[in-house]
């Protein structure tokens, strides 16, 4: 069983509120259009296959046919993420990991969509009904790669792409082929992020705006998470091992090595925060997966 509540000692117990108005609107509009939808592409980040899964997704999309698409597979720890793929498949999901840079496995999404709809199409033909496009809802948390995925499926830049969460603001229909059209949706989260571990993973990997959490909270979480899961990567990048309690020694070391200094040679801690966050975003710690499955 997955445990979203471990490592809570790192953080405060308060919930984090981040629910822009367009998210509530998006959920309402999805509910209103759900009767038009045949298949759902649920998009999650392969580096955080637990934290990036929308908590109330089952309630939102009901019993619609679904494909679980893991984006950013080229950036994840494949051995760890493979455990999640197996877990979700055992739960009955059809899981397709994709590399949105090379386009690997993108065609498999279209093929699986056709497989899911085959019986429905045959039923329509038997009833003498006209053929129509398969309508697909694309849904996921902010900045998980939905728009990039859509552009790969379409073969051109139809969906706007941004590197900050909340780039897509409204639902829009996009034609993929003569057989399939997609309903692109803005990234959505749940109203309160009660789980601090999950919230910090989302923030560290850019699904929550950096303004929502203190930058020191995010950067210190990254250091602690790397120390826990990938200590060799932490040492390779910063020559750091055995973290101190308050991390000040580590921040001083990084600041001096990277030239993040104020006048008089004092360390600029804001710059150090940004260095750590950007190093993660830019892949300088190698392929990582921040979520873990725990034993039942």
Image: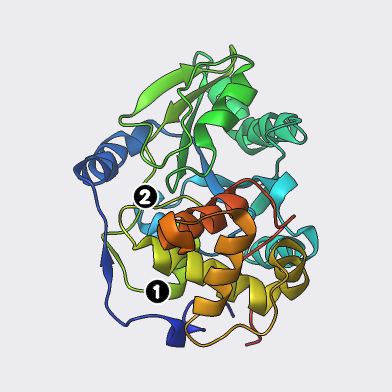
From this viewpoint, is residue 123 visible? no
Q: Is residue 249 above or below residue 283?
A: below
Badge 1 crowding class, 10 Å Cα cut-off, few under 14, some 14 to 19, many 20 or more, is many
Residue 113 versus residue 75 in the image, above or below: above
Query: Residue sitting at 27 percent across and 73 percent down?
Result: 15
Residue 47, horizontal then vertical, whole percent? 63, 57
On screen, residue 155 versus residue 218, left or right, reads: right
User: How many labels were placed on the picture?
Assistant: 2
Image quadrant where residue 289 sits? bottom right
- In the image shown, does 185 or 59 lie closer to the viewer? 185
Q: Residues within 10 Å of mark 2 (few under 14, many from 20)?
A: some
The label nearer to you, 1 versus 2, is 2
Instruction: Pick the quarter of the image with the C terminus.
Output: bottom right
Q: Which residue is mark 1?
A: 196
Residue in the image at 39% along x and 74% along y: 195
Above or below: residue 253 compared with residue 178 = below
The numbered disc on residue 209 is 2
Which element is circle 2 on? loop
Question: Relative to 59, is 241 on the left or the right?
Answer: right
Residue 95 image position (x, y, % from top left) = 67, 51
Q: Is residue 219 shown above or below 68?
A: below
Query: Tag 1's secondary structure?
Result: helix
């Amino acid at each position: 069983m997955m445990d979203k509540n471990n490592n809570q000692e790192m953080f405060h117990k308060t919930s984090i509120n981040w629910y822009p108005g367009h998210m509530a609107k998006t959920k309402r509009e999805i509910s209103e259009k759900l009767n038009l939808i045949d298949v759902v592409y649920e998009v999650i980040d392969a580096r955080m296959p637990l934290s990036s899964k929308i908590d109330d997704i089952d309630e939102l999309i009901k019993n619609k046919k679904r494909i679980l698409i893991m984006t950013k597979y080229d950036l994840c720890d494949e051995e760890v993420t493979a455990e999640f793929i197996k877990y979700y498949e055992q739960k009955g999901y059809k899981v397709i990991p994709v590399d949105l840079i090379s386009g690997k496995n993108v065609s498999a999404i279209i093929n699986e969509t056709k497989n899911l709809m085959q019986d429905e199409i045959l039923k329509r033909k038997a009833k003498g009904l006209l053929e129509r496009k398969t309508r697909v809802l694309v849904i996921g948390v902010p900045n998980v790669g939905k728009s990039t995925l859509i552009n790969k499926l379409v073969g051109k830049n139809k969906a706007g792409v941004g590197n900050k969460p909340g780039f897509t603001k409204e639902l829009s229909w996009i034609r993929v082929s003569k057989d399939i059209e997609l309903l692109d949706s803005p990234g959505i989260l749940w109203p309160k992020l009660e789980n601090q571990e999950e919230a910090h993973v989302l923030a560290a990997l850019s699904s929550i705006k950096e303004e929502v959490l203190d930058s020191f909270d995010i950067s210190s979480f990254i250091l602690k998470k790397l120390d826990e899961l990938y200590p060799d990567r932490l040492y390779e990048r910063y020559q750091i091992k055995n973290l101190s309690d308050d991390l000040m020694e580590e921040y001083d070391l990084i600041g001096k090595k990277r030239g993040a200094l104020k006048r008089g040679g004092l360390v600029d801690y804001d710059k150090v925060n940004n260095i750590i966050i950007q190093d993660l975003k830019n892949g300088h710690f190698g392929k990582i997966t921040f979520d873990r499955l725990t034993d039942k």
